[in-house]
Amino acid sequence: MSIDYTFIWTAFKLLLNAIPLTLLMTVLPLLFGSLIAIGITYIRLYNIRFLNPIATFFVSFFRSTPAILHIMLIYILSPMLIDYLAKTIGFSVQTNKIPIAAFVIVALSFTASAYIAEALRSGILAIHVGEVEAGYAVGLTFSQTIRRLILPQSFYYALPNFVNLFVGFLHTTAIAAIVAVPEITGRATVVASTNYSFLEAYIAAALIYWGLSILIEWAAHLLERKITAFKGGIS
């Protein structure tokens, strides 16, 4: 068996077009997931009645089941729910016109929120109680203490976990190929089907994932150094 190195380069160039969609499907779930995770973390840390068991179940379910299952469930159930709700309120919606990538982003947002909630919780628990008391001492309200002290510092302490999540979700987008979303892996399969050079196409895809992961880790390292320097630590 011989490897067509020329086609690896050809596939590499063709796969570059899939990078924007792949990054979009990585960044948006992490952003939306962060918003959901903040609510979940608040509910669990302050043990809000009735909501805490729901939040705990949510985190447990999405952390204990594979992301590919989340995508399939949302991909299959969402159009059914949308059609049912639209019919109930008498509103016309064509679910077949909704981009498949949107369902993938929703599914991965739920997945991301469960992992981010745990990372945030660990980050908050790492904050010394004296800092919170100092916030109250200078006149900050509860919401201001959460917004100005607790959340920023919890994100700082959880930064390594967030970097791992970012890289992990970059790789997780590959499973979107099962529902025909043309991200890097799905695009590689299409490119390879022209001459059945699947090995070469997947090598090109692997090189792109590798390069993107290195860039993310490098950017995170710079961010961590700047934050550490801002906090007065040793970079």
Image (cartoon, rainbow, N blue to C red):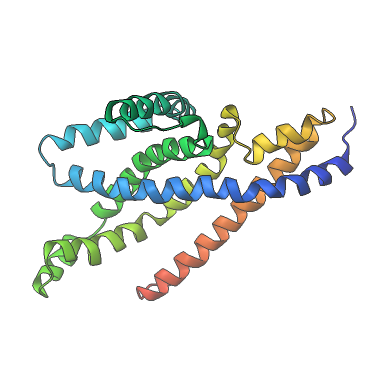
Horizontal relation, residue 234 to residue 54: left or right:
right
Which quadrant holds the N terminus? top right
Q: Quadrant of residue 132?
A: bottom left
Horizontal relation, residue 39 to residue 31: left or right:
left
Q: Quadrant of residue 117?
A: top left
Image point (51%, 46%), residue name: 26
From this viewpoint, is residue 133 visible? yes
Horizontal relation, residue 2 to residue 134: left or right:
right
Horizontal relation, residue 6 to residue 206: left or right:
right
Q: Nearer the viewer, residue 159 or 84?
A: 84
From this viewpoint, is residue 235 visible? no
Q: Nearer the viewer, residue 230 or 47?
A: 47
Q: Position of residue 73 (x, y in %)?
A: 42, 25
Q: Position of residue 155 (x, y in %)?
A: 34, 58
Q: Position of residue 107 (x, y in %)?
A: 43, 35
Image point (27%, 59%), residue name: 151
Looking at the rendered structure, the number of numbered marks drawn on it comes to 0
Image point (16%, 37%), residue name: 51
In the image, is residue 79 above or below residue 217? above
Image point (41%, 56%), residue name: 159
In the image, is residue 82 above or below residue 168? above
